[in-house]
Image: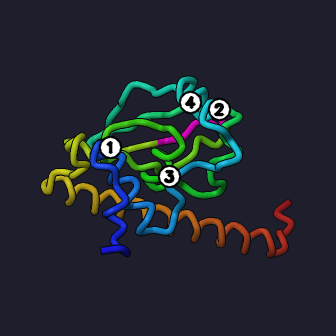
């Protein structure tokens, strides 16, 4: 099968790397970082990347990944990376981690999470935790909608003339 993307995989490559390549091929995302930066630079960035200890709440475990500031030029701006992207840029963690946010005061601090109990080899979350994930996501959506309504209400109030109360 000449058009089979699976045929291009090196069978000596570990499963994590193979899955990142497959995901990148399927999503049209480059599997390799920006070619302008050579392998030595990427290796240096990988060595300088710092991983926090994990911390948890009742649904997720979290960790902060601090990358060198020079690496920011090759990372996508204004959005989170999918797993194949962060792996291709030299961030190495077990399976199942999700880049879910940026630490706004420090652009080079990336925030990751995964569902508690996730299998680090397969990246699969336990089915019993998925209801907690759905509940958390619904609550987050509800909070964001409330915040947006409050912003609109505040803007409306600011547009109205203020009566002299003295």
Q: Is residue 108 magenta?
A: yes
The residue that mark 2 highlights is 41
Residue 34, percent from left and from top: 64, 50
Q: Which mark's residue is nearer the viewer, 3 or 2?
A: 2
Residue 94, percent from left and from top: 32, 38
Residue 55, percent from left and from top: 36, 31
Q: CA distance from mark 2 to mark 4?
A: 5 Å
Relative to 29, is 20 on the left or the right? left
Relative to 151, is 101 on the left or the right? left
Q: Nearer the viewer, residue 27 or 135?
A: 27
Q: Which quarter of the rendered picture does the N terminus lie within?
A: bottom left
Q: Which mark's residue is nearer the viewer, 2 or 1?
A: 1
Q: In the rendered view, would you say 44 is above or below 14? A: above
Q: CA distance from mark 3 to mark 2?
A: 17 Å
Q: CA distance from mark 3 to mark 4?
A: 16 Å
The disc, 3 or 2, on the residue closer to the chain's N-terminal end is: 2
Looking at the rendered structure, which numbered label has been put on residue 85? 3
């Amino acid at each position: 099968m000449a058009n089979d993307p699976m045929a291009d995989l090196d069978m000596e490559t570990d499963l994590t790397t193979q899955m990142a390549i497959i995901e990148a091929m399927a999503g049209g995302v480059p599997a390799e970082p920006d070619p302008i930066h050579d392998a030595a630079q990427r290796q240096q960035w990988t060595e300088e990347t710092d991983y926090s200890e994990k911390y948890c709440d009742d649904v997720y475990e979290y960790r902060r990944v601090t990358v060198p500031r020079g690496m920011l030029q090759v990372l996508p701006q204004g959005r989170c990376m999918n797993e194949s992207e962060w792996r291709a840029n030299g961030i190495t963690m077990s399976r199942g981690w999700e880049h879910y946010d940026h630490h706004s005061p420090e652009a080079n601090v990336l925030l990751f999470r995964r569902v508690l109990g996730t299998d680090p080899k397969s990246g699969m979350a336990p089915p019993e935790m998925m209801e907690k994930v759905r509940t958390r996501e619904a609550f987050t959506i509800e909070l964001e909608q409330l915040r947006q309504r409050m912003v609109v209400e505040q803007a409306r109030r600011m547009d109205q003339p203020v009566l002299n109360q003295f």
